[in-house]
Image (cartoon, helix red, strand yellow):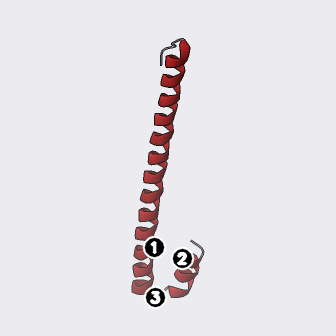
Amino acid sequence: MTRRAGIGGLQNAAAARDQYRLLGENVARLRTDLMKEQLSTFRSQLEDFARKHKVFHFVFLFIYFL
């Protein structure tokens, strides 16, 4: 970002900050959604494992605390 004097420079700097803030918010939202999806997949696969191997008590206690 180059330095510019005057009101135009201040307005450009403010606009750039707003764009970076929005970009950061979008990245954070995407990462949160991805983590939720991964946790959901992990939980369902762990439940399947528990059913197949009959370790319900331990796994369901583990899932409860997720």
Question: From the viewer's perspective, is the residue at label 1 or at label 3 nearer?
Answer: 1
Give coordinates of residue 19: x percent, y percent: 46, 35
Looking at the rendered structure, the kind of residue marked 3 is Lys
Looking at marks 1 and 2 on the same chain, the residue that comes earlier in the sequence is marked by 1
Most extreme residue toward the front, as rendered? 7
Q: Residue at x 51, y 24 (%)?
A: 11
Disc 2 + disc 3, Cβ < 8 Å: no
Look at mark 3 in the image and give the residue it sits on: 54
Q: How many neighbours does mark 1 have within 10 angstroms: few (below 14), some (14-19), or many (20 or more)?
A: some
Q: How many neighbours does mark 3 have within 10 angstroms: few (below 14), some (14-19), or many (20 or more)?
A: few
Residue 46 left/right relative to 62: left
How many numbered tags mark residues here?
Answer: 3
Image vertical order of residue 60 relative to residue 24, above or below: below
Element carrying mark 3: loop
Image vertical order of residue 17 relative to residue 28, above or below: above
Image vertical order of residue 16 relative to residue 1, above or below: below
- Which part of the image, by quadrant, shows the C terminus? bottom right
Image vertical order of residue 12 relative to residue 40, above or below: above
Q: Residue at x 50, y 85 (%)?
A: 55
Q: Residue at x 41, y 75 (%)?
A: 44
Numbered tag placed on residue 63 in the rendering: 2
Numbered tag placed on residue 29 in the rendering: none
Give coordinates of residue 39: x percent, y percent: 46, 66
Element carrying mark 1: helix
Q: Closest to the observer: 11 or 24?
A: 11
Q: Closest to the observer: 13 or 59?
A: 13
Disc 1 + disc 2, Cβ < 8 Å: yes
Looking at the rendered structure, the kind of residue marked 2 is Ile
